[in-house]
Image (cartoon, grey):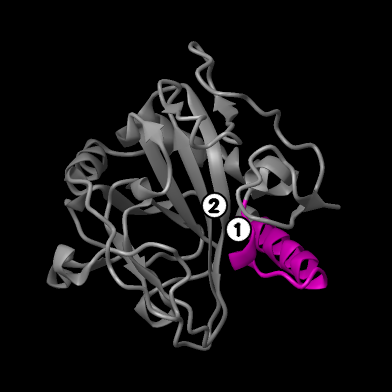
Amino acid sequence: MLSAEQIEQFHEQGYVKGIRVLDDELLGQARELFEKVTAGLAEKGLTHNDVNGWWAVHKGFWNVCKTPAVLDCFEDLLGPDLFIWGGQYFHKAPGDGKTVPWHQDISYWPLKPAEHNVTAWIALYDTDPSNGCMKVIPGSHKAVLEHAGELKESDVLAQALASSEVNESQAVDLGLKAGEMSLHTDALVHCSEANTSNRIRCGMTMRVCSPDVKADLGTWPFFCWIRLRGTDPGGLNPRHDPPTGELIPTGYNQFRGVNADP
C-alpha cells in the first residue's frame, strides 16, 4: 500500500497522510456504524470523549479495523504480525469548543519498544483546520519530551507539553478527505484545535504494534491485545478474542471488554 517514499517519510518525519483506505461503500458503512453507536452512547448519557475500547467490544468497529487496505499499510511499517490494543472515535461536533493540547501519545502508556507502535486515524468525514484536524510537528518523534505544560479548560487530555517544547511555526495540518487515513508514530508531537465550522469532524483510530512490544503489566494490569494479522511468536502480552457482539463501552480503558453494555 505504501510507497518507498511514504515509508521513508514516516520514519524521518513521524507521519504519513492522505492514504485512501475506505471506498464509498465501506465509508458509508463506517458512517452508519458511527451514527448507530453515537445514538447508543446518548441513551446512556455518554459521549465519545467518555469512552474507548470499541475495538475490544464491538464487532462493527472490529470489522473496520480488519479492512485489508488498512492492515496492508500497517504491515508495510511493522511487519506481517500485527496486534491492536487501542481504538476509539475522536469526535468534534460542529461548534465544539474542545481542544487537544500539544502532546506525545508515548507519555500515556508503558510499552516497549515504543517505536514499534503506530496509530491510524481514519477520517469518516472531511477534516481540515476549520473543523479541528490534527496538527503535527514533523520530525518531533526523535525525542521523548517532558509533559509539564499547563492545560486549558477546553483541553480533553490530562497532560500537555510546555509551549517552550513546541515550535508551532513548523506545524503541519493533517487534513484528510473522508475515507482517507493518516499514520503516525506514538512519539510524534501533535494537537488539534476546536471545531469552529458547521461540519462534523470524526475519525476512527487504531493503535497497532508488532509482537515484540511488551506492556509493563505492573503499571497497566488490564492491558491486552487482539491479533489482527499473522502470528504471535512470543506471547508477550495477554490476548483477547475478537469481539462477537455489539456492546457499547461505558467507561475508559476497558481493555478486557468490561464496563460495556448491550
Examine the rendered structure and indicate whether residue 113 appears above or below residue 151. above
Q: Main secondary structure of the magenta part?
A: helix
Q: Is residue 104 left or right of residue 231?
A: left
Where is residue 15? Give x, y as percent: 28, 50
Q: Label 2 is placed on what type of residue?
A: Leu
Examine the rendered structure and indicate whether residue 47 appears above or below residue 25. below
Residue sitting at x 28%, y 38%:
3
Could one spot residue 174 in this view of the protein?
no
Magenta-drawn stretch contains 145 = no
Residue bearing the label numbered 1:
27
User: Which label belongs to residue 108?
Assistant: none
Residue sitting at x 63%, y 64%:
50
Residue bearing the label numbered 2:
22
Where is residue 53? Give x, y as percent: 63, 48
Residue at the right extreme of this rendering = 262
Q: Are marks 1 and 2 in contact (CB under 8 Å)?
A: yes
Q: Nearer the viewer, residue 25 or 241?
A: 241
Q: Secondary structure at mark 2?
A: loop
* Residues drawn in magenta: 27-52
Could one spot residue 225 in this view of the protein?
yes
Q: Measure how far apart labels 1 and 2 are at the Cα level.
A: 5 Å
Q: Secondary structure at mark 1?
A: helix
Residue sitting at x 57%, y 30%:
228
